[in-house]
Image (tube, helix red, strand yellow):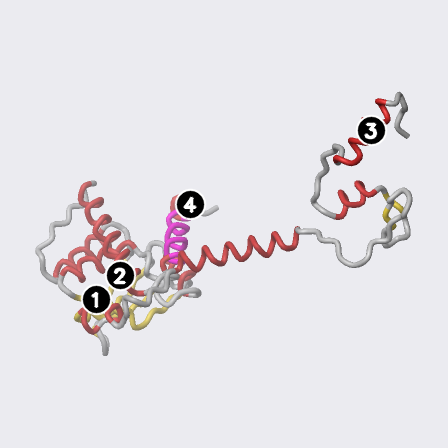
Amino acid sequence: MRDFENTLYEAVLVAFGKILSKYNIFSQGTILKEIGKEIIAYIDQHGFEFKEENNLDDLNKLTDLFVRNGFAEKLEIKPADKGHTYIWHNLFGIEAYHRLYEITENPFLSCPLNLCLYYLADKHHKVMTLHEKKFNLKTGITKSQYELLEKENGPENNFNALVIENARLYELAEERAKKLEQAQKEIKTLKGILPICSSCKKIRDEKGEWHQLESYLNKNTHADFSHGYCPECLAKLKALYKNNKKPL
């Protein structure tokens, strides 16, 4: 049986990653920075001291802090044609990242270290760009090629802020459409000609059986009935009682 704490951690990564992937780059950047900032503050307050020196070396220092405390068994960093390739051995939560890899462009959106590095890079007007990612669950190897770019050249800035792909509005519209479709399926309507008895007012159904008007409508619609007298019938009823005649 799998460890519950690990499974719960992976569940949070997958859930957060899937939700975040629905938002546009502009929205993602804002969220990543804010969460990264909070994570750094939290781990610092709980004994994993991290003092920023306000330079790009802070990214390497924080990465080393994560690795030393079990985020990965080992990390190799190699130069690449663009940026560097990070080779993670037995990365904590690898199955969650692999799951996200199948459904999003960036499986590391919800990675705690990635969030922190994104925040630190932004402080120096840089943006982290992921070029390549590979997973091997059998060997426990994860490869990610990242490049630090000036913010003006990053994908986050190739975005017109007036055109916001708001995922929440889309989901709300989709939810309402589903509810409307379901409501339309549940509505029962009567169409066509209904055979009705001229005398007793019973209705004949498609099987040739006759039913009282109320029972037929109750069965074939969502209507409920309340009983009373129309003014004409009420006047007749009063006249019958006044003349000491019982109504038929």
Numbered badge on residue 72: none
Alpha carbons under labels 4 and 2: distance apart: 32 Å
| Prevailing SS of the magenta stretch | helix
**Is label 4 in contact with label 2 (beta carbons under 8 Å)?**
no
Please tell me which residue is depicted at 30% across the width and 65% down the height of the picture. Answer: 25
Please tell me which residue is depicted at 18% across the width and 45% down the height of the picture. Answer: 44
Q: Which residue is mark 2?
A: 29
Toward the viewer: 126 or 135? 126
Alpha carbons under labels 2 and 1: distance apart: 9 Å
Dot placed on the residue nearer the N-terminal end, 2 or 3: 2
**Is label 2 in contact with label 1 (beta carbons under 8 Å)?**
yes
- What range of the chain is rendered magenta? 7-19
Horizontally, residue 220 falls left or right of residue 23, namely right
Mark 1 residue element = strand
Alpha carbons under labels 2 and 3: distance apart: 77 Å
Q: Residues within 10 Å of mark 1 (few under 14, many from 20)?
A: many
Q: Which residue is mark 1?
A: 127
